[in-house]
């Protein structure tokens, strides 16, 4: 149990493309995210625990969180990931 708790901070570790970029916490509906962005790339990490979240809802909320946190538009065709992390290209 303690090992699992020790690994939780690694779940929001940024990928190389957004490392060193801005970090913002954002709530969209029932979802909580940590959004990281740098240049034309952004990532939203879902931070709340949910049982079987619907992928369509998570992707929509993640894209909204990225837009709110960055003030930029998400390139919808670039949205990828899973119910834990959403990546997208942004246009500012």
Image (spheres, rainbow, N blue to C red):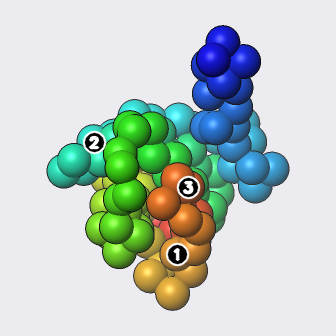
Q: Residue at x 55, y 65 (%)?
A: 82
Q: Residue pushed farthest right?
A: 16
Q: Is residue 36 left or right of residue 71?
A: right
Q: Please name the residue that numbered disc 2 is placed on.
A: 27
| Residue 80 coordinates in the image, percent (x, y) | 57, 73
Q: CA distance from mark 2 to mark 1?
A: 18 Å
Q: Please name the residue that numbered disc 1 is placed on.
A: 79
| Residue 13 coordinates in the image, percent (x, y) | 69, 37
Q: Nearer the viewer, residue 89 or 63?
A: 63
Quarter where residue 43 is shown: bottom right
| Residue 35 coordinates in the image, percent (x, y) | 49, 45
User: Which of the numbered marks, if any, corresponds to residue 43?
Assistant: none
Q: Residue at x 35, y 74 (%)?
A: 56
Q: Is residue 48 left or right of residue 16?
A: left
| Vertical order, 28 against 26 (above or below) | below
Q: Disc 2 or 1, which lies upstream in sequence? A: 2
Q: Nearer the viewer, residue 86 or 69?
A: 86
Q: Disc 2 or 3, which lies upstream in sequence? A: 2
Quarter where residue 22 is shown: top right
Q: Please name the residue that numbered disc 3 is placed on.
A: 85
| Vertical order, 86 against 44 (above or below) | below
Q: Is residue 42 left or right of residue 50?
A: right
Label 3: state its secondary structure. strand
């Amino acid at each position: 149990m303690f090992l699992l708790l020790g690994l939780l901070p690694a779940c929001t570790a940024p990928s190389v493309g957004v490392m060193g970029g801005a970090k913002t916490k954002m709530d969209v509906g029932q979802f909580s995210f940590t959004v990281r962005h740098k240049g034309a790339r952004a990532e939203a990490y879902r931070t709340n625990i949910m049982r079987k979240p619907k992928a369509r809802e998570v992707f929509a909320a993640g894209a909204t969180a990225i837009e709110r946190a960055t003030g930029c538009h998400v390139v919808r065709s670039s949205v990828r990931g899973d119910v834990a992390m959403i990546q997208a290209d942004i246009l500012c």
